[in-house]
Amino acid sequence: MFDLKGYGHLLFEGALVTIEVAICAMIVAIALGLIGAAGKLSKNPVAHFFANTYTIVIRGVPELVLLLLIYFGGTVLLQTVAGQLFGREEPIDINNFVAGVLVIGFVYGAFATEVFRGAFQSIPKGQIEAAMACGMSKGQVFWRIKLPQVWRFAIPGLGNVWLVLLKATAIISVIGLPELTRQSTIVMNPTRKPFTVFLIAAALYLIMTAVSDVFRHRFERRAALGIRRI
Amino acid sequence: MSFDFPLIWNSLPDLLGRGLVLTIQLTLLSVLAGLCLAVPLGILRASHNPWISKSIYIYTYVFRGTPLLIQLFLIYYGLGQFHWIKSTFLWDFLREGFWCCLIAFTLNTAAYTTEILRGAIQNVSHGEVEAARAIGMPRFTVLRRIILPQAFRIMLPAYSNEVVLMLQATSIASLVTLLELTGVARVIIARTFAPYELFITIALIYLALTYGIIWLFKKWEQHLMRHLGERPADAPAEGALVTR
């Protein structure tokens, strides 16, 4: 039942692409999360408005719709712009790896925003006041006091975001990126064993989740080092 | 570039009349069926017997650890690999995208709901359970009268999040040729090549549905909590994003 007629390696290559996409998207998500949290916690009403709109829209729209909108809509937009500005007529292709990373990063950036917002709020106020009293500037307070500590509070939440993000990369298969799910749909035809193929794909995803879980526990323990336990 | 408003107007009957109806059907049916499965599973998952609890955990771990899309493809494409299934009456259902979606969505949401319910059951106050036992209530009555109503109240905020995620997950039904909201939009786009107009329109419809669901659950929660009077709720803030 598990003989894939020599197509099996495609699944493993797909799994590698899945991991690459997920890591890149997570970096985008963390960057956007920090910016979003800064916006949500800022006293500037414009920044506040944009950060809130961001999380509200992301929560309300399925990832698949955002992916299709940005990939196909983006192609049309770029083509129109290129046509009007430079007189270019040939079709433009958006790189599907970049598109996938940006969309997944953009979506999970909203979740990371909530995580970071909570984490920044968990930093004891006294420490920030103490730093200010020492004469640190706002930037110094951010780099020296807030950022090193925010990870401690954010890591459990970010671990969760990572686990959901990893599985969400499956929808990038729709725009043809050869990640695990896409490779499975390719392999299922010549092998005529769709069940076996998807079962293996599911097992690979499960392994990724399980390994992530181990790392998450380790990170959490490390982040909590030096904290007095009651 | 211009925005083609007449096109949106002309697509609305298809989007709302067919797409939206199927999206709501899929969401409601899978969420209800998932809840029916999750209640007994959640009770067993909260059991003190490690054999029972662990075996349910394997199910929830597998379904929560793999993408829903893979689960859907496993059922939609995968079951055709077994010729004996094709010769039974089951095949009448399983060859249709609608039933495959319903099965995949139900099993998936049931796994998440089981874990939500387990968390809620374990958070029911011990004092009330002990009090009920002390006056001689049988175990099943304790479950029905004390534990489940309280657990339901506790799990409602997390559960509303699950329902919202399920609503959005129904968009992947379009990948197995179902004409729900996303599917209808993609068919119209293939004909007119106007991705902006259609995708933004359905994005707004999903947005409205999502916040409609959140509002309904909020009302329901207030209704269930009315006996508690004015007390600060420890539910996530309004509009807060929570991963599952």
Image: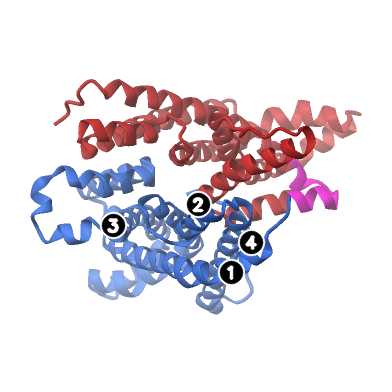
Chain colours: A red, B blue
Closer to the eye: label 3 or 4? 3
Q: Which chain carries label 2?
A: B
Left of A97 or right of it: where is B86?
A: left
**In the image, are marks 1 and 4 on the same chain?**
yes
Residue holding disc 3: B103
Q: Calculate the distance from the C-alpha at mark 1 to the C-alpha at mark 3.
A: 33 Å
Closer to the camera, B61 or B22?
B22
**Residue type of the residue flagged with mark 3:** Ile
The mark nearer the N terminus, 2 or 4, is 2
Mark 2 or mark 4: which is in front?
2
CA separation in Å, label 3 and label 4: 31 Å
Q: Which residue is labeled 2 in the image?
A: B190
Q: Residue B10 carries which label?
A: 1
* Residue A105 in the image, given as x and y percentages of width and height: 59, 37
In the shown orientation, is residue B222 left or right of residue B108?
A: right
Q: Mark 3 lies on which chain?
A: B
Name the residue tied to disc 4. B238
Disc 1 residue type (three-letter) = Asn
The quarter holding residue B131 reads: bottom left
Question: Residue placed at 41% from the left, 67% from the top?
Answer: B22
Q: Decide: marks 2, 4 in contact (CB < 8 A)?
A: no
Q: Is the magenta stretch mostly helix, strand or loop?
A: helix
Q: Residue A44: x and y, percent?
A: 85, 49
Q: Looking at numbered disc 4 in the image, what kind of residue is underneath it?
A: Glu
Check whether the beta carbons of the residues at disc 1 and disc 4 lie within 8 A of each other.
no
Q: How many marks?
A: 4
Q: What stretch is highlighted in magenta?
A: A38-50
